[in-house]
Amino acid sequence: MIVSSDRVLSNRPFNDAPIGIFDSGFGGLTVAREIAKELPEESIVYFGDTARCPYGPRSQDEVDGFVQQICTWLVGRDVKLLVIACNTATAAGLEHAQQRFSIPVIGAVIPGARAAARATKNRRVGVIATKGTVESGCYPQAIRNIDAGITVFSTATPKFVDIVEQGIRMSRGPIEDLTSLASKVYIRPAFQEIARDYLEPLRRCEIDTLVLGCTHYPMLKALIGGVIGHNVLLVSSAEEMAKEVRETLSMRGELAHEGNIAKHEFFTSAPNLDEFQSFGSRVFSEPIERPTHIDLSRL
Amino acid sequence: MIVSSDRVLSNRPFNDAPIGIFDSGFGGLTVAREIAKELPEESIVYFGDTARCPYGPRSQDEVDGFVQQICTWLVGRDVKLLVIACNTATAAGLEHAQQRFSIPVIGAVIPGARAAARATKNRRVGVIATKGTVESGCYPQAIRNIDAGITVFSTATPKFVDIVEQGIRMSRGPIEDLTSLASKVYIRPAFQEIARDYLEPLRRCEIDTLVLGCTHYPMLKALIGGVIGHNVLLVSSAEEMAKEVRETLSMRGELAHEGNIAKHEFFTSAPNLDEFQSFGSRVFSEPIERPTHIDLSRL
């Protein structure tokens, strides 16, 4: 909160440049969707690095390299703000990107950590994420920076990413929750067994809040909620990230001007553009334009 | 960002217990005022430790002891959430209090750090605060946790507290800004000299955003803005703290019920209750009830 807003008022009060968003694939489109909903006048340039997906099992250094490469490409398209809509990429490359680029870079971890810290009542919070995210320790650190009295239990749940990928292929309708009854995707016994293996230890830790620390996981909320118990709050960061983008642009006087006709552009490193457009439209919850292929790995 | 709100809905959806707020004296009443404005149905128990004010020059250990003592007293009054409305006390005792008490404890540093990190454009942020707050390093740490690309310049400005204390005694009207023309408080040349001594080095660092890291400092915004330059954004945390309180209570299903008649109670460690009531009413911007004297130092 600003006690003197002279500076913002004296600069130009809007900026129609697009917001740059990227993810290792489709998952970040859940974040792009929330940003488009929260800020309908903002243009978006989305890059899905589907050719190199998943990032989860890769080393921090390798993922950091991808993050810097993609951010550089997005900055070259004159975006006004960068969103790393992927927890693994945030854990590996956020700080480096913030040090490197002169525009704000918003990651996935702090918004989710903040929501969990606010919500927990018994101050026992679980985090499920990819191996890379868990090993970085970024969630326990971010949560305990906000509230040092919270105990955090983290576990890597990489197979959930595969379940989502399979589920997207199996389902026909919208894919807000692939494991809900409405999605018509059968919750296979094998999926439930995987979920029990992963989540039973967290359940025994008596957590009351669980951070879904990967943009894919909200698509499994019925499966996860069924195993962890419906008394445990599930937290994802997409909506909180969209608020963070709005507040950052607003405080900098860099929202798009009122009435701006937003343009949403999609780029992917994978050559199969039909698949990206078809799956992407369902994750984004509305038809997306045909994406453009960019082979970043050959840059 | 809550993908399953079952838990909040299944628990009782409101909590009429008061919010506990404390400060070393009157300064925190600016925070209490914002909370009362943002959440008019919430009861408040305010404790001003005026007898031991100022905290700024004291050791971290001593202030930490005060924080734990006052929080224990407030928890004994069945508050549902604690607000440390003092930067020095936050720096010295927030983490300890969070580890010790089972209710949420909200400090002054993170909300101000977040606002500054969002606002800066050239990513050069200044912080002015008491000696204790600056020496703790809490602001640079909190700001760089949010954006690792920001350079923070901090400086202790303890005499600003004395100027505010003098100003409150000299002024007759409301004291939103003691150094504005409207306040009818003469900006003494001596005050301007002190401000120049403190702020000139920060001005030369080319900061574009300045955190007022003490609840007293917003009352000097005309003086500070005049020296640092009106192109520098001044950030204080009172309003941002009030939002943090609202979002925390809302996410926990612990807001007061609609239509709750809020009660505002005031306590102070200083024996001069008339002075507390008279100055307090002007800082709180509306008449406060006669405070009750509590001698915590003898507990």
Image: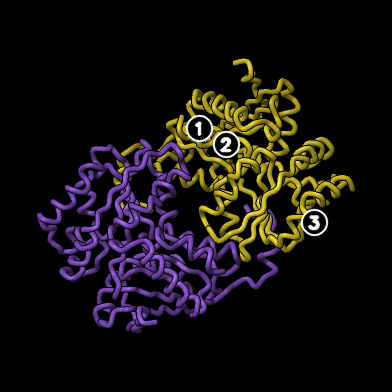
Chain colours: A yellow, B purple
> Please, what is the three-letter code of the amino acid marked with disc 3?
Gly
Going from N to C along the chain, the mark reached first, 1 or 3, is: 1
**The numbered mark 2 sits on a residue in which chain?**
A
Residue B42: where, in percent of width, then height? 48, 73
Q: SS at mark 3?
A: helix
Residue corresponding to mark 1 = A97
Q: In this view, does A217 lie to the left or right of A167?
A: left
**Rendered residue at 19%/47% (across/down):** B227
> Please, what is the three-letter code of the amino acid marked with disc 2?
Ile
Residue A10, by quadrant, is top left
Q: Kindly check if marks 2 and 3 are in contact, taking CB atoms under 8 A apart as contact.
A: no
The quarter of the image holding the C terminus of chain A is top right
Residue corresponding to mark 3 = A226
The CA distance from mark 2 to mark 1 is: 10 Å
**Residues at discs 2 and 1 both on one chain:** yes
Q: Residues within 10 Å of mark 1 (few under 14, many from 20)?
A: many
Q: SS at mark 2?
A: strand
Q: Kindly check if marks 1 and 3 are in contact, taking CB atoms under 8 A apart as contact.
A: no
Q: Is residue A102 left or right of residue B8?
A: left
Residue A218: where, in percent of width, then height? 71, 47
The CA distance from mark 2 to mark 3 is: 29 Å
**The numbered mark 3 sits on a residue in which chain?**
A
Residue A74: where, in percent of width, then height? 53, 27
